[in-house]
Image (cartoon, rainbow, N blue to C red):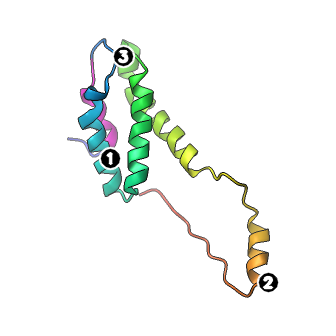
Amino acid sequence: KGSSMFSFFKNITGQKAITEEDLAQVLANMKEHLIKKNVAADISTHLCESVAKNLIINNLTDYFIKAIRSTVKQAMEASLKRILTPKTSVDLLRDIGQSQAESRPYTICFVGVN
């Protein structure tokens, strides 16, 4: 069993449309893997649902079977971008200046990938 979450998808093969039943265990494993990597449970659920939607609407072809890792990765990237893109623009310098004017610290949290 590989350590990559994408290895969970290696068992999906054949010339048929992917169904939710096909993905149930795979997505459960992916969610568990994400949570073990310190991704919040609600975010893990959202990512798995988004990946499932992208996979279910596609039919498996020889090309798709060979490219499933890439497809899953693209679905994950799109979901992460949607989650991490702020709804409002952030003017960092203005916010820091406002914090200084109010005599309170401005806190920045850097988050990285494990």
Per the model, the C-alpha gap separating discs 3 and 1 is 23 Å
Residue shown at the point (34%, 16%) measured from the top left: 17
Residue shown at the point (45%, 37%) measured from the top left: 50
Residue highlighted by disc 3: 60
Does the magenta run of residues contain 10? yes
Q: Quadrant of the N terminus?
A: top left
Q: Earlier in the sequence, mark 2 or mark 1?
A: 1
Residue shown at the point (69%, 85%) measured from the top left: 104
Where does residue 63 sit, x and y in percent of width and height? 40, 15
What's the residue type where badge 3 is placed? Answer: Leu
Q: Is residue 22 left or right of residue 78?
A: left
Residue shown at the point (67%, 78%) measured from the top left: 106
Secondary structure category for the residue under label 2: helix
Mark 2 vs mark 3: give the one in front.
2
Q: Quadrant of the C terminus?
A: bottom left
Circle 1 residues within 10 Å: few <14, some 14–19, many ≥20: many
Residue highlighted by disc 1: 31
Per the model, the C-alpha gap separating discs 2 and 1 is 43 Å
In the image, residue 12 sits, relative to residue 5, either above or below, namely above
Q: Quadrant of residue 49?
A: top left
Secondary structure category for the residue under label 3: loop
Q: Is residue 42 left or right of residue 89?
A: left
Q: Earlier in the sequence, mark 2 or mark 3?
A: 3
Q: Quadrant of residue 46?
A: top left
Would you say the magenta stretch is mainly helix, strand or loop?
helix
Q: Earlier in the sequence, mark 3 or mark 1?
A: 1
Circle 2 residues within 10 Å: few <14, some 14–19, many ≥20: few
Per the model, the C-alpha gap separating discs 2 and 3 is 58 Å
Where does residue 41 sit, x and y in percent of width and height? 37, 54
Identify the disc placed on residue 101.
2
Start and end of the magenta stretch? Answer: 4-13
Where does residue 19 sit, x and y in percent of width and height? 31, 23
